[in-house]
C-alpha cells in the first residue's frame, strides 16, 4: 500500500496544487512543497518499515499488485527494492528543490506549472516502481508529457525547438521500447502459453534469455537516449538549457536516472546474454561520454549548457558501470545516480539563482562575482568539486567503484574514464574562474556589488545537498548496502574476470580468509 | 597515548569546521586562536604520541587504527584507517610543528586581510588533509588526503582573488597536478584489481609475493605511482606549476609549497618502496628524473629576479635531490633531507615574507638591497636558512642531509657516478643562487626603506626555525665524524643496513664541501652589487641565450602552452556547437524535405489520382502474373 501512496502523493499533490490556484499562487507553492516533502517522508518510511528484503531476486522490500487488464496479462504491479526507494527519496527531495527554485522564477500559470512538475515526478516515481512492462511503458510516456510542457511553456528563449527536440528523441527511443516490449510479450506467450507483461515472470523467461540482440536493443534505445549515451545526447543540452530551473533539476536529477535505472532493472536482468554482447560497445560509448561531455562543457558560454554537458560526462560513468559486468561497478553506477542527482541538481539550482540575480546565463557577461556573492561562490565550489570527483564527496566513491569494477574487464576503458577526470578538472576550475574569480565584464549589466547573496530556503536546500554529498563521500556504506543487493542480475561477480596475478598472490600469500580471493569470489546467493 | 592518533588530523579539521561555519562571526583574535591553536594542539598531541611510540614501540614497529569502513562491496572494502610508523611519525611531526610556526607567523602576516578567517580555515583544512595523507593505511584514504591537499593548494594560491593572475596560477596548479593524480588513481586501480586489497602494507607484501623483480605489471604500477609523485612534488615533466604557485600569500608558500605538501611525492615513493624495489627500471627513472630536475631547476633559480621564484625553483631542485635518494634505494636519506629542508626552506620563505611585507608586496630582488642593517633579525635568520640550503659544511643541517644523499648516490648498490656528479653540480648551483638571494636582498646600497619590521609573532617562528636549520642535522652525523645515524636508524628500520666506508665517505664530503665554498665565493664574485662580471657574461650572445632559457625555466611553459593548452582550447572552441548535433539536424531536414516532396502528390485532381491508381494496378498485376 505504501508504494501506492508513493505514486498517489505526487499525482494528488499535482491536482491539489492546480486547484489551489483559485486561492493564491502562494497556496500552490506550499501545496506542491508539501507534496514533494511528503513523498520524501513516505519513501523514508517505506525504507524503515520494510527493512529486510524478501528472499529471491530482485530483493523487493515492498510490493503492491492490483488487476488492471487481466485478459492481456497486464497488472498494476508496483515493487520496490533499496535502489528504487533511494531514487524515489531523491525524487521527493529534488521535487522540494524544484519548488523552491521556482518560488521567484515562475510567475505565470503557477498552478498549471506545479501540476506539470508534480506529474512529471509522479511519472518518474512510476518508472522506479513499475514491475510490469506495460506499466513501465505507461509511466515512461507519462513522465515525458509534463516535461514537454514544462519546457515548452515556461522555458527560455528557444523553448519550443528544445521541447520538440526532447520529445522527438525520447519518443523515438520510447517507441522502439514499445515494439521490444510487445515482441517479448508475444515471444514469451508463444513459448510458455502464458501471455503476461509481469516483470518477474519474464525474468529468466526462455524467450528473453534466447532473445536476439535486437530485442534487447529496443530497450537499450529508450534508455540510452534518456541516459544519454554519446552519440544520442544532442537533445540534452538544448532541453536542459531551455527548461525552467525546476525543469532542469528534474531532467538532470531524475529523468536521466530513469534511463540508468532502466539499464540496471530491465536490460541487464532480462537479457543477460544480449547484454554481454552489447557490453563492449556500451563500455566504449560510456568512456567516450565521460571524455566528450567534459571536453564539451569547457567551451560553453551558457552556464546551463555548461552544466548540461557535465551530465553527459557523468552519465558516461553510469553506462560504464552498468555494462562492466561486476557488482563493484554496478554499485558504483547506482551510487553515481544518487550523487549526480544531488550535485548536478544543485548546480542547476545555482545557475537558476545566478540568472535570477544577474539577469543572464552568459558566462561572458558574468565574472568577478566572488566579492559580491561569497556564499554563492562557496556553494558553487563545493558542487563543482563534487562534480570533478574530489574524494570526500559522493561522486568520487561512485566513480572509483565504477572504474575499479571495469578495470579488470578493460583497463583501457578504465584509463579513459580516469583520464576524463583531467578534462573535468579543466572545466571545473574554468567555471569557477570565469564566473567568480576572473575579470568582471567590461560593461556590467547589473551592479555586481549589490546582488543579493544566497539565503533562506535556497541556501537550506543546498546545505542539505552538500551534507548528502559529504555523507555519501565519507560514509556511503548505508547507501551502498541499500542499493547493492538490487543492482544487476543476481549472478554478477564482485569484480569481473579474475585477475591472474591476484590468484597467484592469493595462493602464495595464503592471506587471511577470503580477502585476496575476493577478486574472484562470486556474490553470495 | 597511541590510540589518540586519530585526533592528530581531527584537531585541525575541527578548527576548519569551526572557522568554516562561524569564522565570519569571530573576532580576528579568536580566529587566530582557533586557526593556529588547533594545529599547535595537534603538534602537542603528536609530540606526546611520538614520545609514547619511541618509549615503547608497538609490535611490528607500527600502530594501526581503523576508524570506520568507508565502503564494502561483496567483500572488497576500503577502510578509513590510520597507520603510525616511523616514516609517518616524522612527517606528522614536521607537518604539525612547521604548521604551527607558520600559522603563528600568519596571525601577524595576514593581519588586516578582509578574509582573515577564510585563510585560517583553509590552512587548517590543509594541515588536517596532509596529516590524513601521511597517516593513511589505505591507498584510497591516502588519495583522499592527496586530493584534499591539492584542493587547499588551489584555494590558497588563488586566495587573493582580486588579482586574476592569482586565479590563473591556481587553475594551472590544480590542473597540472591532476594529471599526476589521475596516474596515481589508475595505479591504485591497478594494484587494487590485481592484488585485491586497498591496504598499503598488504598490497606491498602481496606485490612482492606475486610479482618477480622486473615484472611488467609491477613496472607499470610503479610508473603510475611515480606519475602521481612527480605531479605533487613538481618534478620533470610536471614541475611547471610550482613557480607560478608563488602567487599565494607567502605563509602558504612556506608551509604548502616548500615544507610539506610538495614532499608528499617523496612520502608516497618511500611508502611504496617495496613496489619500486621490484621495478628496477622505474626506480632508475626516479633517480634520473630527480637528477635532471635538480639541474634544470638549479639553473632556472639563477636567473630569477622574483625572490619567491628563486625559492620555488630551489624547492623543485631540493626535491630533485630527494628523488635521487629514492631512486638509489636510500629512502631514509630522502626523508632526512625532507626533514631538514622543511626547516630551512620554511625559514627562507618566512624571511622572504618579512622582506616582501616590508616592501609592500614587491617581490623583485633588484628593487631591494641594503636591508642588512635595517632588518637585522630577518637578515641573520634568512642568511642562516640560505647557508643551510647551500649546505655550508659542518655547521648547517642542510649539509648533513645533502651529504648523505650525495654519498648514497654513488655508494648505494643502485647508485651511479653520474648521479653523484649531477648532485655535485647541483650543490654548486645551490650555493650560487642561495648566496645571490642574500647578496641582492641584503647587501649593497639601500634602494628602498622597509615599511615595517616583523613583530614578535613573526620573529619567534623565524628564530626557532633558524635554530633548527642549524641543529636539526646533528641527529645524523656521519660515521667519519664520530656520529651515529640516529635518524636513518629510526626511519630506515627494516631497510637494509649499510656500513659506510669511512674514508670514501669523508673524501666525498670533502669534495662536496669544497665545491660549496667555491660556489659561495664565486657568487660573491658574480653577484656582489657593483661588480660588472655578470653583466659582461650576460651581454655575450651565449650568455644572453642562457639567461633567457634560465629565466623561462627552459621553456616548458611555452611548450606546454603550444602543445596542450592552445590546441585543447582551439579544438573545444571549434566543437562548441557539438559536431554530433548537425547530423540530427540534417536528419530533421531530410524528413522535412521528404514531406515537402510528397506534398506535391496531393494535387486534388481526380485524373492524377486515377493515373496513380492505374499505374499501381498494372504494377501489381505484372508482379502477380510474372511470378
Image (spheres, rainbow, N blue to C red):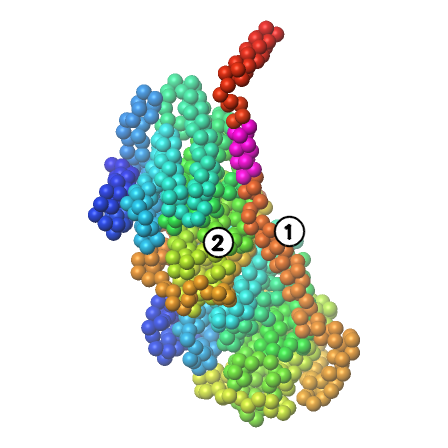
Same chain? Circles 1 and 2: no
Residue marked by disc 2: A302
Residue marked by disc 1: B215
Residue farthest to the top, as pictured: B625
Question: Where residue B209 appears, x then y in whole percent?
Answer: 57, 52
Disc 2 secondary structure class? loop
Can residue B555 be seen by looking at this rendering? Answer: yes
Mark 1 nearby-residue class (10 Å; few <14, some 14–19, many ≥20): few
Question: Where residue A51 appears, x then y in whole percent?
Answer: 29, 43
The reply to whether dot 1 and dot 2 touch (C-beta < 8 Å) is no
Residue B62, above or below B114: above
Q: Nearer the viewer, residue A492 or B502?
A: A492
Question: Where residue A188 appears, x then y in whole percent?
Answer: 42, 22
Tag nearer the camera, 1 or 2: 2
- What segment is highlighted magenta in the picture? B584-597
Residue B615, above or below A298: above
Q: Is residue B360 left or right of residue B314?
A: left
Report if residue A412 lies within the magenta region.
no
**What residue sits 47% from the left and 37% below the top?**
A169
Q: Quadrant of the N terminus of chain A?
A: top left
Q: Nearer the viewer, residue B281 or A121?
A: A121
**What residue sits 48% from the left and 47% below the top?**
A237
Separation (CA) of disc 1 from disc 2 = 50 Å
Report if residue B589 lies within the magenta region.
yes
Q: Is residue B63 left or right of residue B280?
A: left
Main SS class of the magenta portion in the image: helix
Chain of the residue under the numbered disc 2 shown in the image:
A
**What residue sits 32% from the left and 51% below the top?**
A107
Chain of the residue under the numbered disc 1 shown in the image:
B
The label number, if any, that marks residue B624 in the structure image: none
Which picture quadrant has residue B17?
Answer: bottom left
Amino acid at each position: 500500500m505504501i508504494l501506492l501512496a508513493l505514486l498517489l502523493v505526487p499525482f494528488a499533490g499535482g491536482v491539489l496544487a492546480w486547484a489551489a490556484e483559485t486561492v493564491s499562487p502562494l497556496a500552490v507553492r506550499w501545496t506542491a512543497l508539501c507534496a514533494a516533502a511528503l513523498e520524501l517522508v513516505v519513501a523514508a518510511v517505506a525504507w524503515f518499515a520494510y527493512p529486510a528484503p524478501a528472499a529471491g531476486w530482485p530483493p523487493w522490500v515492498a510490493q503492491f499488485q492490483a488487476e488492471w487488464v487481466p485478459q492481456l496479462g497486464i497488472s498494476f504491479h508496483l515493487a520496490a527494492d533499496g535502489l528504487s526507494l533511494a531514487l524515489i527519496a531523491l525524487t521527493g527531495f529534488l521535487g522540494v528543490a524544484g519548488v523552491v527554485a521556482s518560488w521567484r522564477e515562475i510567475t505565470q500559470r503557477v498552478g498549471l506549472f506545479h501540476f506539470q512538475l508534480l506529474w512529471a515526478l509522479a511519472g518518474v516515481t512510476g518508472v522506479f516502481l513499475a514491475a510490469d512492462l506495460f506499466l513501465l511503458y505507461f509511466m515512461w510516456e507519462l513522465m515525458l508529457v509534463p516535461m514537454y510542457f514544462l519546457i515548452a511553456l515556461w522555458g527560455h528563449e528557444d523553448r519550443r525547438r528544445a521541447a520538440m527536440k526532447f520529445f522527438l528523441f525520447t519518443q523515438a527511443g520510447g517507441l522502439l521500447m514499445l515494439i521490444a516490449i510487445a515482441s517479448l510479450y508475444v515471444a514469451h506467450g508463444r513459448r510458455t502459453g502464458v501471455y503476461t507483461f509481469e516483470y518477474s515472470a519474464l525474468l529468466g523467461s526462455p524467450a528473453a534469455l534466447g532473445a536476439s540482440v535486437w530485442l534487447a536493443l529496443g530497450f537499450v534505445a529508450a534508455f540510452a537516449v534518456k541516459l544519454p549515451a554519446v552519440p544520442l545526447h544532442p537533445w540534452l543540452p538544448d532541453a536542459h538549457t531551455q527548461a525552467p530551473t525546476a525543469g532542469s533539476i528534474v531532467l538532470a536529477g531524475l529523468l536521466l536516472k530513469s534511463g540508468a535505472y532502466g539499464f540496471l532493472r530491465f536490460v541487464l536482468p532480462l537479457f543477460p546474454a544480449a547484454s554481454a554482447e552489447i557490453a563492449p560497445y556500451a563500455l566504449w560509448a560510456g568512456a567516450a561520454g565521460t571524455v566528450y561531455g567534459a571536453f564539451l562543457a569547457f567551451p560553453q558560454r551558457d552556464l546551463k549548457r555548461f552544466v548540461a554537458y557535465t551530465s553527459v560526462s557523468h552519465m558516461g560513468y553510469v553506462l560504464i558501470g552498468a555494462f562492466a559486468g561486476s557488482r563493484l561497478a554496478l554499485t558504483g553506477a547506482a551510487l553515481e545516480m544518487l550523487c549526480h542527482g544531488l550535485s548536478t541538481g544543485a548546480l542547476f539550482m545555482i545557475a537558476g539563482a545566478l540568472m535570477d540575480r544577474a539577469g543572464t546565463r552568459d558566462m561572458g557577461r558574468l565574472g568577478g562575482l566572488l566579492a559580491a556573492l561569497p556564499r554563492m561562490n562557496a556553494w558553487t565550489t563545493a558542487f563543482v568539486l563534487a562534480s570533478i570527483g574530489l574524494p570526500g564527496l559522493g561522486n568520487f566513491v561512485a566513480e572509483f567503484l565504477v572504474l575499479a569494477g571495469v578495470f579488470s574487464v578493460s583497463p583501457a576503458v578504465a584509463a579513459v574514464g580516469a583520464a576524463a577526470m583531467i578534462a573535468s578538472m579543466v572545466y571545473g576550475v574554468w567555471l569557477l574562474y570565469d564566473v567568480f574569480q576572473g575579470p568582471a565584464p567590461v560593461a556590467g549589466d547589473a551592479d555586481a556589488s549589490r546582488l543579493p547573496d544566497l539565503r533562506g530556503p535556497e541556501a537550506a536546500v543546498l546545505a542539505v545537498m552538500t551534507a548528502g554529498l559529504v555523507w555519501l563521500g565519507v560514509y556511503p556504506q548505508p547507501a551502498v548496502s541499500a542499493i547493492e543487493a538490487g543492482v544487476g542480475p543476481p549472478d554478477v561477480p564482485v569484480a569481473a574476470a579474475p585477475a591472474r596475478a591476484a590468484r597467484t598472490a592469493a595462493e602464495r600469500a595464503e592471506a587471511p580468509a577470503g580477502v585476496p580471493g575476493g577478486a574472484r569470489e562470486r556474490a553470495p546467493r | 597515548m597511541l590510540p589518540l592518533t586519530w585526533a592528530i588530523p581531527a584537531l585541525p579539521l575541527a578548527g576548519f569546521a569551526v572557522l568554516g561555519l562561524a569564522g565570519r562571526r569571530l573576532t580576528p583574535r579568536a580566529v587566530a586562536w582557533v586557526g593556529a591553536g588547533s594545529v599547535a594542539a595537534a603538534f602537542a598531541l603528536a609530540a606526546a604520541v611520538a614520545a609514547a611510540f619511541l618509549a615503547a614501540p608497538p609490535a611490528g614497529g607500527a600502530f594501526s587504527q581503523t576508524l570506520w569502513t568507508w565502503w564494502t562491496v561483496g567483500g572488497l572494502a576500503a577502510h578509513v584507517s590510520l597507520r603510525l610508523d616511523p616514516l609517518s611519525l616524522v612527517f606528522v611531526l614536521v607537518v604539525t610543528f612547521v604548521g604551527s610556526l607558520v600559522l603563528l607567523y600568519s596571525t601577524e602576516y595576514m593581519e588586516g586581510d578582509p578574509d582573515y578567517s577564510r585563510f585560517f580555515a583553509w590552512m587548517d583544512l590543509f594541515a588536517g588533509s596532509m596529516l590524513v595523507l601521511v597517516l593513511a593505511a589505505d591507498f584510497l584514504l591516502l588519495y583522499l588526503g592527496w586530493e584534499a591537499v591539492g584542493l587547499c593548494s588551489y584555494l590558497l594560491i588563488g586566495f587573493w582573488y582580486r588579482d586574476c593572475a592569482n586565479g590563473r596560477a591556481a587553475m594551472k596548479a590544480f590542473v597540472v597536478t591532476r594529471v599526476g593524480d589521475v596516474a596515481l588513481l589508475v595505479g591504485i586501480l591497478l594494484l587494487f584489481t590485481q592484488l585485491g586489497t586497498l591496504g598499503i602494507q598488504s598490497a606491498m607484501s602481496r606485490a612482492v609475493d606475486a610479482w618477480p623483480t622486473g615484472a611488467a605489471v609491477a613496472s607499470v604500477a610503479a610508473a603510475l605511482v611515480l606519475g602521481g609523485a612527480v605531479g605533487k612534488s613538481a618534478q620533470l615533466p610536471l614541475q611547471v606549476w610550482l613557480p607560478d604557485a608563488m602567487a599565494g600569500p607567502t605563509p602558504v608558500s612556506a608551509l604548502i609549497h616548500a615544507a610539506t605538501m610538495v614532499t608528499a611525492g617523496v612520502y608516497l615513493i618511500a611508502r611504496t618502496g617495496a613496489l619500486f624495489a621490484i621495478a628496477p627500471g622505474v626506480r632508475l627513472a626516479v633517480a634520473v628524473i630527480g637528477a635532471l630536475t635538480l639541474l634544470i631547476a638549479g639553473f632556472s633559480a639563477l636567473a630569477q629576479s622574483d625572490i619567491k621564484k628563486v625559492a620555488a625553483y630551489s624547492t623543485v631542485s631540493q626535491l630533485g635531490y630527494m628523488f635521487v635518494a629514492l631512486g638509489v634505494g636510500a629512502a631514509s636519506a630522502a626523508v632526512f633531507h625532507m626533514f631538514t629542508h622543511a626547516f630551512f626552506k620554511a625559514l627562507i620563505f618566512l624571511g622572504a615574507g618579512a622582506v616582501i611585507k616590508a616592501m609592500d608586496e614587491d617581490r623583485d630582488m633588484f628593487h631591494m638591497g641594503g636591508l642588512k642593517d635595517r632588518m637585522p633579525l630577518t637578515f641573520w635568520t634568512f642568511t642562516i636558512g640560505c647557508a643551510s640550503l647551500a649546505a655550508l659544511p659542518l655547521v648547517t643541517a642542510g649539509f648533513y642531509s645533502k651529504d648523505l644523499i650525495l654519498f648514497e648516490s654513488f655508494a648505494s648498490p643502485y647508485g651511479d657516478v653520474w648521479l653523484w656528479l649531477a648532485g655535485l653540480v647541483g650543490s654548486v648551483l645551490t650555493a650560487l643562487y642561495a648566496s645571490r638571494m642574500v647578496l641582492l636582498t641584503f647587501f649593497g646600497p639601500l634602494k628602498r626603506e622597509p615599511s615595517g619590521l616583523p613583530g614578535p609573532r613573526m620573529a619567534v617562528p623565524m628564530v626557532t626555525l633558524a635554530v633548527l636549520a642549524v641543529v636539526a642535522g646533528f641527529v645524523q652525523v656521519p660515521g667519519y665524524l664520530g656520529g651515529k645515524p640516529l635518524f636513518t636508524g629510526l626511519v630506515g628500520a627494516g631497510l637494509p643496513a649499510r656500513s659506510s666506508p669511512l674514508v670514501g665517505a669523508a673524501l666525498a664530503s670533502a669534495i662536496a664541501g669544497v665545491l660549496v665554498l667555491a660556489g659561495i665565493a664565486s657568487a660573491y664574485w658574480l653577484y656582489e652589487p657593483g661588480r660588472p662580471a655578470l653583466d659582461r657574461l650576460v651581454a655575450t650572445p651565449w650568455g644572453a641565450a642562457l639567461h633567457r632559457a634560465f629565466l623561462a625555466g627552459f621553456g616548458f611553459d611555452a611548450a606546454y602552452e603550444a602543445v596542450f593548452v592552445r590546441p585543447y582550447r582551439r579544438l573545444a572552441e571549434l566543437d562548441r556547437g557539438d559536431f554530433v548535433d548537425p547530423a540530427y539536424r540534417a536528419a530533421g531536414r531530410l524528413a522535412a524535405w521528404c514531406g515537402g516532396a510528397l506534398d506535391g502528390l496531393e494535387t486534388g485532381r481526380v485524373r492524377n489520382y486515377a493515373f496513380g491508381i492505374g499505374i499501381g494496378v498494372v504494377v501489381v498485376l505484372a508482379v502477380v502474373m510474372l511470378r
